[in-house]
Every structure is written in C-alpha cells, then in structure tokens.
Amino acid sequence: MSAVTRKTGNLVWKGRGCSLLGLAIPMLTLMLTACSGNGMGDLHQFVDEAKQKKGRVEPLPQFKPVETFAYEASMLRDPFGAATANPRIAAGDKGATGLSPDVNRHREILENFPLDALHMLGTFEFKDTKWGLVKAPDGIVYRIKSGNHLGQNFGKVQTVQDKKITLVEIVPDGLGGWLERDAYLAINEQ
C-alpha cells in the first residue's frame, strides 16, 4: 500500500490507506467529548433559586352555616304538578264554559305521557279503519284510532291522517273553567 496524504482544512493526514471511516471515528470522538460538557448549569441555578423561595398557601375560606327550613305546605296542591291535581276536576265542576273533562272514564295508557313526548311513526288501514302508530317514551309503539285518548290534557283523537293525528284537548282556562284546544301529532320527517 502506498502512503496517502490528505489535507482537510488545516490538518494534514499522512498514513497508509486512510479511509473515510478511519477519519470519521476520531472526529466523532473529538466532537462528542467537546459536547459532553455538563450544560445544565442554568437548570441547577434555577432549582437553587426556586428552593430559596418560600411558598404561601392561602387559608381556606370560612363557610357560613346554611339555615334549615322545614317545608310545611305538603297538604297544599303542588304548584309544579300536572293540571289533573286541580280539585275542580275531582268535583266535576264545569265552570263558566260548561265544559269539563270526564274524570270517571278509564284512562288509556298514552294519557300517562305528555303530548310532546309522543312520536307519530306512521299509519296503516285495517277493515276500513285508519290506525296511527305512536311511539311513547317507554319505547313501545302503540296503535290508536279516532276516539282514543292521548296526552296529559285529556286529548281525544279526532282524525288519523297519513302525516298527522289531530286531537282536541281540554285544558284549564286559568279562571277556574276549561277550554278546548286543537292539537296534533305529526310525523317527524328527518
């Protein structure tokens, strides 16, 4: 093998068969030792400064005791209850309009749910009678026809059409009497 002279920057390498790998290993070692300094002086300084600081925790706020209240109106009518809690219904008082819901009839299952909680799913016809399919919040699908009752306001079904069910509800008028109000349940087309 012949002697090889290579010049790299200011360094001159002389040797036999010096390869690039032979040069790379000493250079890499030199660079790693030069870069292996601690380099954490600023971190140690920050930690020392943080240890010297004294922390302060705010005291917990003082809680005022809550005054207890005994509710003694349990015998009165619930102001948030359904309209059926009205004592005039039980008495069958017709008020000024002469209208009153029939409280003596057998209540149907769909009268346990508010009208806005019921969903019309569709219709079908059987023996010349059009039936509506209504899904209740309990997840059961019920069939209804004209004359059935639904909703919590004594609603009576008037007609079952392809896209909606019309009914008449009997609601309190706010003056101690009753009013008829038209309502409907339509198919929700999404």
Image: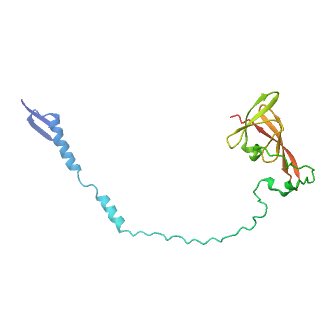
Residue at x 10% of width, y 32% of height: 17
Relative image position of residue 146 (x, y in whole percent): 83, 36
The C terminus appears in which quarter of the rendering? top right
State left or right for residue 87 relative to residue 45: right
User: Would you identify the image quadrant in which residue 167 lies?
Assistant: top right
> Toward the viewer: 47 or 58?
58
Q: How is the image coloured?
A: rainbow
Is residue 8 in view from this perspective? Answer: no
Q: Residue at x 82, y 56 (%)?
A: 86
Rendered residue at 21%/49% (across/down):
34
Out of 105 and 176, give the one closest to the viewer: 105
x, y percent for residue 131: 78, 33
Where on the picture, by quarter, is residue 49? bottom left
Viewer-proximal residue among 4 and 83: 83
Report whether residue 149 is seen. Answer: yes
Q: Where does the image place residue 126, in percent across and percent down from the top left? A: 78, 28
Which quadrant, please, contains the N terminus? top left
Judge from the rendering whether residue 41 lies leftward or rightward of residue 173; answer left or right. Answer: left
Q: Which picture quadrant has residue 151?
A: top right
Q: Position of residue 59 (x, y in %)?
A: 49, 71
123 shown above or below 60:
above
How many numbered circles are shown? 0
Q: Which residue is drawn at the image coordinates 17% and 36% (left, top)?
A: 21
